[in-house]
Image (cartoon, rainbow, N blue to C red):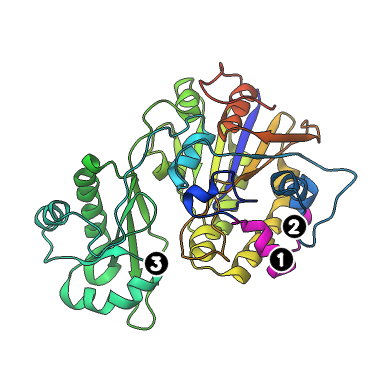
């Protein structure tokens, strides 16, 4: 029986979608703009067909890429059918469940949050008040309000262009478990507002040296219908969620969750899964550094270096794949580090499929991320999912 590996390069878009102007993202191109700003050395990804996928998406090769006579994977690009450019929408859709409803969003503010919500959070959370209450970059608002938070005990509550409510608090001065409990309270309060995620953003340090820690935790609403993960788990298969996958799916369909505070730890967990996952299993990994550390912070050089580090980790993974294994590299949205603001960008994503028995060939334009889930369902011997067209 086969195994599947789905590796998500969080935010690694390869060219603006046709509806990008609806999101204010016309012209965004995460890969293209990074490659234009700084030469990239990505031998493994190029061999798998990344350049060809980007050319199919945009009509031209990224700077420094060249056409090849042969490739080691099947390559193409996928268009998001879901109505957002957020993490849950992208991941749920690639697991076979497009998000065809509209998330709710908070206005830029201040204030961003309705008084009824903040009053309930203060009362139920037993806190003296909140700070922030507006759209903000997480690192910037922590630097701005961190000292006042420590002095007053009021957590920093903020949002963004995504359907999120984020709460930042100092791990020592406020307490990590207290922050998690406050986020669980916020999750229940935010449910009637149709908000996708509550995110705990713990940090440490002092003024001028505050830094967020790896103890982030997302409290997402569960998918509204079964996904590929649920189908696999319901058939007695192992579904290994690596990084924030379990958070994104609210634990639904994940039979084993492995923490991964950074891309390096994520790859170590993937290598463990290659070694240990039983036949019929799916290992589903999110590599979040691209998005959190570099895309949102508009750090082109850091994003480029992270891509090269990721590329360098691929050879042992490729070599460890067994006959019958299939791996798919993709992304959930864009986050062009050259773009205005600090939010995600509406883009196509790469679809690079490979394994010992995967023929190198073009996959072309995939009309939905759900084609990925449908392909893995077929490969793993499941009945067809409701959405998507298989390419394997």
Question: Taking the image as drawn, is residue 279 in sight?
Answer: no
Q: Is residue 19 visible?
A: yes
Find the distance from the CA under tag 2 to the CA under tag 3: 29 Å
Query: Which range of residues does the magenta coloring cover?
Result: 27-43
Magenta run includes residue 30: yes
Question: Relative to residue 360, is residue 10 drawn left or right?
Answer: left
Q: Quadrant of residue 128?
A: bottom left
| Position of residue 229 measured from the top left corner of the image (x, y, whole percent) | 48, 30
Within 10 angstroms of label 3, few (less than 14), some, or many (20 or more) residues?
some
The secondary element bearing badge 3 is classed as loop
| Residue 259 image position (x, y, % from top left) | 46, 51
Query: Does label 1 or label 3 sit earlier along the sequence?
Result: 1
* In the image, farthest residue toward the bottom: 208
CA gap between label 2 and label 1 equals: 7 Å
Q: Earlier in the sequence, mark 2 or mark 1?
A: 1
Is 340 displayed left or right of 315 in the figure?
Answer: left
């Amino acid at each position: 029986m086969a195994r599947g590996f789905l590796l998500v390069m969080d935010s690694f878009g390869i060219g603006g979608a046709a509806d990008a102007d609806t999101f204010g993202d016309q012209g965004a191109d995460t890969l293209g703009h990074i490659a234009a700003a700084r030469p990239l050395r990505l031998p493994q990804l190029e061999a798998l067909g990344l350049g060809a996928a980007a050319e199919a998406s945009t009509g031209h090769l990224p700077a420094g890429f060249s056409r090849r006579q042969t490739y080691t994977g099947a390559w193409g690009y996928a268009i998001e059918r879901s109505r957002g450019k957020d993490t849950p929408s992208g991941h749920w859709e690639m697991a076979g469940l497009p998000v065809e409803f509209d998330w709710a969003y908070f206005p830029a503010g201040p204030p961003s949050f309705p008084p009824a919500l903040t009053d309930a959070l203060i009362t139920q959370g037993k806190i003296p008040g909140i700070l922030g209450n507006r759209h903000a970059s997480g690192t910037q608002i922590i630097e701005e309000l961190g000292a006042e938070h420590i002095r007053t005990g009021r957590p920093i509550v903020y949002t963004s262009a995504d359907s999120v409510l984020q709460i930042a608090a100092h791990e020592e001065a406020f307490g990590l478990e207290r922050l998690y409990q406050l986020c669980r309270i916020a999750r229940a309060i935010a449910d009637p507002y149709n908000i996708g995620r509550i995110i705990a953003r713990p940090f440490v340090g002092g003024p001028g040296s505050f830094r967020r820690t790896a103890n982030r935790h997302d409290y997402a609403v569960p998918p509204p219908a079964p996904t590929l993960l649920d189908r696999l788990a319901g058939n007695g298969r192992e579904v290994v969620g690596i990084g924030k996958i379990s958070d994104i799916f609210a634990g639904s369909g994940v039979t084993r969750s492995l923490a991964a505070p950074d891309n390096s730890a994520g790859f170590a967990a993937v290598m463990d899964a290659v070694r240990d996952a039983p036949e019929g299993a799916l290992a589903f990994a999110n590599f979040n550094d691209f998005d959190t550390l570099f895309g949102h912070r508009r750090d082109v050089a850091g994003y480029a270096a992270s891509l090269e580090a990721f590329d360098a980790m691929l050879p042992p993974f490729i070599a460890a794949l067994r006959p019958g294994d299939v791996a798919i590299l993709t992304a959930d949205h864009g986050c062009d580090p050259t773009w205005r603001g600090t939010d995600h960008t509406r883009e196509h994503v790469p679809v690079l499929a490979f394994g010992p028995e995967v023929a190198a060939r073009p996959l072309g334009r995939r009309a939905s991320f759900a084609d990925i889930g449908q392909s893995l369902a077929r490969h793993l011997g499941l009945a067809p999912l409701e959405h998507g067209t298989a390419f394997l």
